[in-house]
């Protein structure tokens, strides 16, 4: 039976091969019950999708394959520590465990903004470099009220 | 010419209509040069994609429409403060400005994990509720080294 090391090595191999295909140096593998459900690289530049990081791609693939938005029981192996976008996706997908190799400082040293985005997210929105404004809060809260009143909704 | 209030109101309207379509109570609109490029709701449950939040969907649509992973010059209007996944995506997409209505506490009160995920991301990985392990760092760093040595790569 394959072990954690095998799966993480596979994610790193994908990251290496992905460079040759014109993609970014990142790979991810999702495993359930010892079987690989999804294995893919980053495709931001070759699909023109800024959200197409390896982990996001792998989560989308695994969800499609398992026909559910709930990946409980799955583990993810990522060649690099997930950025906040991907880490958020891992939480939303309810993945059980994360295994990673390089860290966000390594990513920064390779020219990626992961560490910067981690710092930004930690700031109150008024202090972020991304210009941010809030208004119409009461209008939006009314929609949440309606949502809470629905009895037969699909929660996630 | 439409104003910020109009665009944010439209995002909130989408969130309200989205509930009727079986989606979550969230909507987002992306605008460039005063024109709407993408306007869409959350589709996590009806497409079985845990990453399909309104902002992620809107960023994917806008990138496809403009044929680029770089949404510089665009602004995003979101019915709710983006979760860390979506905020990360906004940074990666290089969107200029974020306008939002409800906040992460409102989202929490409506049953969504946004505030929890914000807290988790802020912790060192050893202290998160998501089980996380790191190994094979040197193997992955070698791939970054290869990446840095490529001269004609598409950076992002």
Image (cartoon, coloured by chain):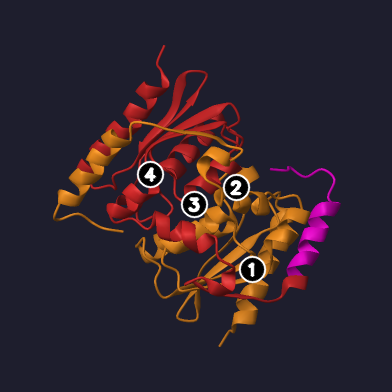
Chain colours: A orange, B red
Closer to the observer: label 4 or label 1? 4
- Label 3 belongs to which residue? B84
Horizontal side of B125 relative to A144 (left or right) equals right
Residue at figure coordinates x 45%, y 74% from the top left:
A96
Residue at figure coordinates x 29%, y 48% from the top left:
B24
In reply to whether residue A83 is colored magenta, the answer given is no
Question: Relative to residue B155, is residue A67 depicted above or below?
Answer: below
Give me the disc on residue A120: 2
Give me the disc on residue B103: 4
Q: Quarter of the image for the C terminus of chain B: give it.
A: top right
- Label 1 belongs to which residue? A11
Snapshot quadrant of residue A20: bottom right
Residue A58 appears in the figure: no
Question: Relative to residue A3, is residue B7 depicted above or below?
Answer: above
Q: Secondary structure at mark 2?
A: helix
Say whether marks 4 and 2 touch (CB < 8 Å).
no
Snapshot quadrant of residue B39: top left
Calculate the distance from the C-alpha at mark 4 to the C-alpha at mark 2: 17 Å
Q: Quarter of the image for the N terminus of chain B: give it.
A: top left
Q: Residues within 10 Å of mark 1 (few under 14, many from 20)?
A: many
For the magenta stretch, what is the residue range? B139-156
Q: Do the dots labelled 4 and 2 sit on one chain?
A: no
In reply to whether residue B155 is colored magenta, the answer given is yes
Q: Position of residue B3 (x, y in %)?
A: 41, 18
Q: Chain of mark 4?
A: B
Q: Chain of mark 2?
A: A
Residue A45 appears in the figure: yes
Q: Secondary structure at mark 3?
A: helix
* Foreground residue among A8 and B82: B82
Q: Residues within 10 Å of mark 3 (few under 14, many from 20)?
A: many
């Amino acid at each position: 039976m394959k072990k954690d090391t095998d799966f993480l090595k596979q994610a790193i191999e994908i990251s290496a091969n992905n460079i040759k295909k014109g993609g970014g140096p990142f790979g991810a593998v999702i495993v359930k019950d010892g079987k690989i459900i999804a294995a893919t690289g980053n495709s931001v530049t070759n699909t023109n999708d800024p959200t197409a990081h390896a982990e996001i791609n792998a989560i989308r693939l695994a969800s499609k394959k398992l026909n559910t938005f709930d990946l409980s029981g799955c583990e993810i192996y990522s060649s690099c520590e997930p950025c906040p976008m991907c880490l958020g996706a891992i939480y939303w997908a309810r993945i059980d465990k994360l295994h990673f190799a390089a860290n966000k400082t390594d990513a920064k040293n390779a020219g990626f903004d992961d560490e910067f985005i981690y710092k930004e997210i930690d700031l109150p929105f008024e202090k972020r470099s991304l210009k941010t404004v809030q208004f119409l809060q009461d209008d939006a809260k009314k929609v949440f009220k309606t949502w809470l009143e629905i009895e037969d909704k699909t929660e996630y």
